[in-house]
Image: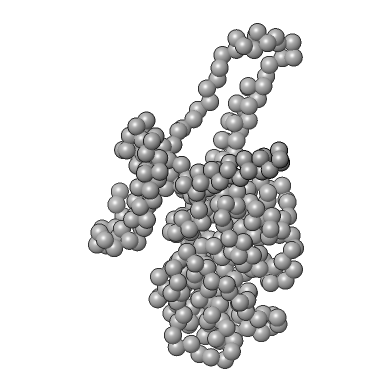
């Protein structure tokens, strides 16, 4: 069913808002890259499976970072996938460093920038002792804010610096670079936690920023509620408050509430099925002969073939293959 919002918008505006052209361009690129296999599936099935993967959020797996962060839906899908894949880290109570969390991120996105991981860790560690260990939940909610609202936070940092210097910004700073570029941010000076800027003035600037920004921003009503409860606010205090606010987490919609972070019945059920399959395949007794094994019926595990493959993943595998040959050759010499 079409939403009332969809019916109230002109067609071109709705397509732009939902980034439909971004996905169409990517689908055509994937189609051209996999054109040898199209005879197996057909173009109609290819597009059906591509847009089903977009709807399910699996389309970002092993893709290049420029695509992963290209749309709000892609970012939310990546956050949800990261949580589902690695929630056992938190379930087991493991504590990891920023570098180790970055390695996990690179398992899903090979060229994920270390800079974003460091910024997320800085929210948790307040720019101190960056090699300290962090819990999965602390890192995940800080990473969500940093990754999803990246451009918004760049502007917030600039506004905070102006207010800290005693200026009253008349013009809200909105990033002018493309969304694929992440500028190096100089961390604001929050040495004294009792300092900071006046919360009411800070909110006025942020409200104007949210009204004018073309990038994703947290709901201004929730930001107002957060800042109205204090007189002064530091930059990292604000980022930490964003990360801990469950209202903002629900508005974003990628992760469950903190109390439900380690619960994922659907994923648990899939894992139990896989374990049962593996157990069933390995149930042959020690006295079984090779002839008996040869006569066992072959179990075909359910598999869904996809007519498209991530471009970056394919290029990465080709490059690794070439590199491994070179190393082998040099070792033989």
Residue at the spot 44% in from the left edge and 68% down from the top edge? 178
Quadrant of residue 329 within the rendered picture: top right
The part of the image, by quadrant, that contains residue 176 is bottom left
At which x and y percent is residue 186? 61, 77
Q: Camera-side residue: 216 or 320? A: 320
66 or 328: which is nearer to us? 328
Residue occupying image coordinates x 44% and y 36%: 306
| Side (left or right) of 73 relative to 187 | left
Q: Is residue 182 left or right of residue 86?
A: left
Residue 32 percent across, percent down from the top left: 36, 44
In this rendering, is residue 195 above or below 262? Answer: below
Relative to 248, residue 37 above or below? above
Q: Is residue 135 visible?
A: no
Residue 188, position in %: x, y? Answer: 62, 79
Above or below residue 38? Residue 150 is below
Using the image as rendered, state which of residue 187 and residue 329 is in the foreground: 329
């Amino acid at each position: 069913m079409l939403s009332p919002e969809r019916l109230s918008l002109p067609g071109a505006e709705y397509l732009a808002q939902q980034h439909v052209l971004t996905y169409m361009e990517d689908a055509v690129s994937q189609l051209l890259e996999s054109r040898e296999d199209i005879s197996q599936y057909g173009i109609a099935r290819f597009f059906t499976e591509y847009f089903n993967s977009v709807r399910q959020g699996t389309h970002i797996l092993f893709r290049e970072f420029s695509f992963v962060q290209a749309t709000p839906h892609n970012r939310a899908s990546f956050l949800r996938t990261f949580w589902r894949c690695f929630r056992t880290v938190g379930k087991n109570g493991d504590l990891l460093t920023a570098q180790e969390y970055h390695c996990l991120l690179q398992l899903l996105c090979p060229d994920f920038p270390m800079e974003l991981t460091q910024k997320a860790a800085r929210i948790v560690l307040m720019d101190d002792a960056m090699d300290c260990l962090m819990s999965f939940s602390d890192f995940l909610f800080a990473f969500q804010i940093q990754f999803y609202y990246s451009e918004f936070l760049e502007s917030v940092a600039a506004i905070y610096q102006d207010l800290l210097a005693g200026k009253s910004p008349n013009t809200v700073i909105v990033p002018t670079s493309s969304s694929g570029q992440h500028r190096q941010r100089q961390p604001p000076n929050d040495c004294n936690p009792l300092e900071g800027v006046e919360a009411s003035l800070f909110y006025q600037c942020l409200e104007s920023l949210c009204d004018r920004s073309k990038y994703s921003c947290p709901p201004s009503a929730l930001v107002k509620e957060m800042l109205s409860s204090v007189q002064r606010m530091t930059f990292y205090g604000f980022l930490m408050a964003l990360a801990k606010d469950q209202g903002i987490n629900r508005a974003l919609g990628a992760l469950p509430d903190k109390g439900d972070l380690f619960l994922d019945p659907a994923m648990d059920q899939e894992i139990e099925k896989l374990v049962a399959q593996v157990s069933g395949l390995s149930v042959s007794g020690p006295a079984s002969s090779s002839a008996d094994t040869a006569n066992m019926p072959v179990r075909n595990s359910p598999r869904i073939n996809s007519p498209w493959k991530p471009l970056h993943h394919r290029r990465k595998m080709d490059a690794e293959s070439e590199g491994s040959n070179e190393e082998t050759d040099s070792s033989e010499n």
